[in-house]
Amino acid sequence: MYIAILRYKVPSEEVDLYREKHITFLKAEYAKNNLIVSGRMMNGKGGVIISPLTRRGDFEQLLKKDPFMIHNIADYEVIAFEPSRFHPDFATFILEPEKENIELVPYTPEWEVTFKAEAEKISHALGQTLLDIHHIGSTAIPGIVAKPIVDILPVVKDIQEVDRLTSSLEALGYEAKGEYGMPGRRFFIKKQKGKRLFNVHIFEEGHADIERHLRFRDYMRDHPDTAQVYSDLKKDLVKKSPDDIEKYCWGKEDFIKGVELKALLWKTH
């Protein structure tokens, strides 16, 4: 379950111009059971939306359809929580989490071979807008366990050009997911027989998340002891929740943020 805390970026007079459209959006999503409740903050500076959705990316994509988001009236912060921890009766509000058996396998050099072969296809699809393409994520870090999904980060001159080239990536078997919770990104996934093989995160040159991903990868490659702690953490999380991908991802978040800070200082000095 998720809460979105909305904070107005403009005076109340401008908010009022889009309030009816915002309410229409909320009513439509209530009817689909994508939202449970919403309301204004008591200080009049924003509002709160509660959703029973079980994937953060799905909720963030939903929020982008809100007229307040479309017209840059407000920004938002998404927070995950389990209401049953407050009272067991609240559990009835939570949608059944999507189950996904989490498979972790030992590192293999074949992942680099797989990356290079797929990167060549993606490079051809993106053409002249492509500037660089990187292997990121756990399959790019020797010695640690990973889900057997190769993460690829292409850097492009113009992110809008990627939107025009979506059909070229779809021809390779990719499914377009839009920003999927990360502003400025174009996210694509590729599956075979229902099993995900590749995640592709496309960013325009200069986007801060490019260096964030590369710093994390390089720091872990250069600090095998830290990488091993990360590997052990992942194995422990799978033991606790072998089919709950959201709990698995959230369980890694604090560790990842800590390493990202260390990596920033490491690169800076």
Image: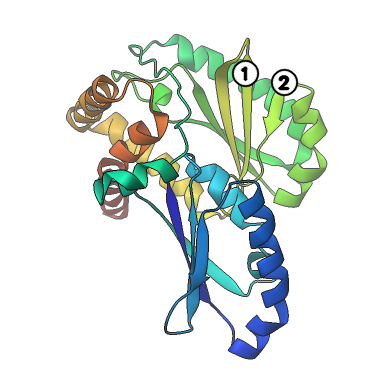
Residue at 33% across, 20% down: 242
First in residue order: circle 2 vs circle 1:
2
**CA neighbours of label 2 inside 10 A, class few (<14), some (14 to 19), many (20+):** some
Marks 2 and 1 close (CB-CB < 8 Å): yes
Residue annotated with mark 2: 173
Residue at 62% across, 28% down: 189
**x, y percentage for residue 72?**
64, 71
Residue at 28% across, 43% down: 88
Q: Which is nearer the eye, 98 or 195? A: 98
- Left/right placement of residue 170 relative to residue 140 reads right
Residue annotated with mark 1: 191
The structure's colour scheme is rainbow
- Distance from Cα at disc 2 to Cα at disc 1: 7 Å
Tag shown at residue 27? none
The quadrant in which residue 73 appears is bottom right
Q: The disc labelled 2 sits on which kind of residue? A: Gly
| Residue 16 in the image: above or below residue 122 | below
Q: Which is nearer the eye, 93 or 184? A: 93
Residue at 56% across, 29% down: 199
| Residue 77 in the image: above or below residue 152 | below
